[in-house]
Image: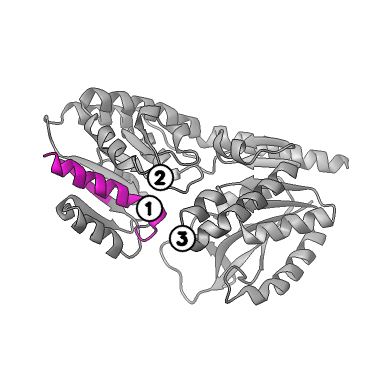
Amino acid sequence: MKLLFAHDHVFYKYNKQYYSTGGLSKEMLERYSNIFEEVVVVSRQKEVESLENKLTLASTDRVTFIRVPDFKSARTYIKIAEAKTIVKKAVKNSDVVIARLPSSIGDLVVDAAIKNSKPYLIEVVACPWDAYWNHSIKGKLLAPFMYFSLKWKVIKSPYTIYVTNNFLQRRYPTKGKSTNCSNVALTEFDDQVLARRLGRIEGMPNNSKLTIGTTAAVNVKYKGQQYIIEALGQLKKQGIDNFEYQLVGGGEQKYLTKVAEKYDVVNQVKFIGVMPHNKVFEWLETVDLYVQPSRQEGLPRALIEAMSRGIPSFGARTAGIPELLDEKFIFSNTKDNIKQICTILKCFDKTVMKEQAIQNYNEALKYDKQIIEKRRYDFLEQLRNEIDVL
């Protein structure tokens, strides 16, 4: 049985092999090749002359790749006819379709699957309303259209996988069969990690400096680091300056630097830059608090990884973030968010930090890879078996 998998993800082609920035690696594509005899991936591609450290292998047995031209921008939109032709042919040559949405290529594939009466499954991995509304003025104009486009597709989808437990299900309900399978699946848990964290908290001197961490691109405003920086400025006015904010992530730092200068906390904000994923866990061991302040998410891997290290955490009321954290450690996406962030930061004494370390570690255990992948495998196998009967 041949599966067609569709997403806007960019694969990098080098020496007849395909590589990914990590979102769709060899391991992740084998989720599908373990069920279906042949997997064809339709996506964007880019040929490169050398490999960078950030790229991971995507090529694997029984998985092939078809390039779809970029047609997302006004400059490249003329290529949409070519993209539709490629997608139409790929759908006709497949037995079943899986589209990861929101994505432009995924939209084309779902439309073609419906027209050609092909069984299909939609993976809902993010909320386009949040993504577009918090992007720009142009994004606010597109947000309603993108929201209703996804809502219309998902409600009619015969099979749907959501990456959240509740949020995306409520916003984009389906009348078909569904399950929840986070794209976050952790492989290593060690109770000694929690024990070390509790020991670190207990050993902290009173009123010692607390290091706050966030891993996210620093040049994307909807990631929300500016709100934490502004809150530090408000706390400094109150005589509270024992926080340091460390930001791991790539991108131009100019905007956030200006925010730090505006609120007179330049000495409290430290840009770490890009960090290999295996080094992130080492850095997390040095962090006292973790925050996910973004206004657009699915279910944030970075937050779950921090929680798996027993780090007391807080975050914005965005997408799946409130599903992970204690309600008292969620701040709004309104003009009151700075005041709320300040209140949360001031409440982190040793007792609260130890309570949250334990609660967060136990919550992260739910994202054990074996548990999630078993649920995903069973759902995909059900899809395949029901197609076989048709």
The numbered mark, 1 or 3, whose residue comes first in the sequence reads 3
**For the residue carrying disc 3, how many other residues have a C-alpha within 10 Å: few (<14), some (14-19), or many (20+)?**
few
The numbered mark, 2 or 1, whose residue comes first in the sequence reads 1
Provide the secondary structure element on which disc 3 rests. loop
Task: Give the image location of residue 270, x and y in percent.
Answer: 22, 54
**For the residue carrying disc 1, how many other residues have a C-alpha within 10 Å: few (<14), some (14-19), or many (20+)?**
many
* Res. 287 visible in picture: yes
Judged left or right of residue 358, residue 212 is left
Residue at position x 11%, y 39% in the image: 239
Give the residue pinned by disc 1.
216
State the extent of the magenta-drawn residues as a range.
218-246
C-alpha gap between disc 2 and disc 1: 8 Å
Q: Amino acid at mark 1?
A: Ala
Residue at position x 62%, y 34% in the image: 375
Q: Quadrant of residue 62?
A: bottom right
Q: Is residue 227 magenta?
A: yes
> Which mark identifies residue 302?
2
Q: Amino acid at mark 2?
A: Ala
Residue at position x 33%, y 32% in the image: 310
Q: Amino acid at mark 3?
A: Ser
Which residue occupies the foreground of this view, 174 or 356?
174
Q: Are marks 1 and 3 in contact (CB under 8 Å)?
A: no
In this rendering, the answer to whether 351 lies above or below 42 is above
Give the residue pinned by disc 3.
136
Judged left or right of residue 221, residue 230 is left
* Res. 59 visible in picture: no
Q: Are marks 2 and 1 in contact (CB under 8 Å)?
A: yes
**For the residue carrying disc 2, how many other residues have a C-alpha within 10 Å: few (<14), some (14-19), or many (20+)?**
some
In this rendering, the answer to whether 268 lies above or below 240 is below
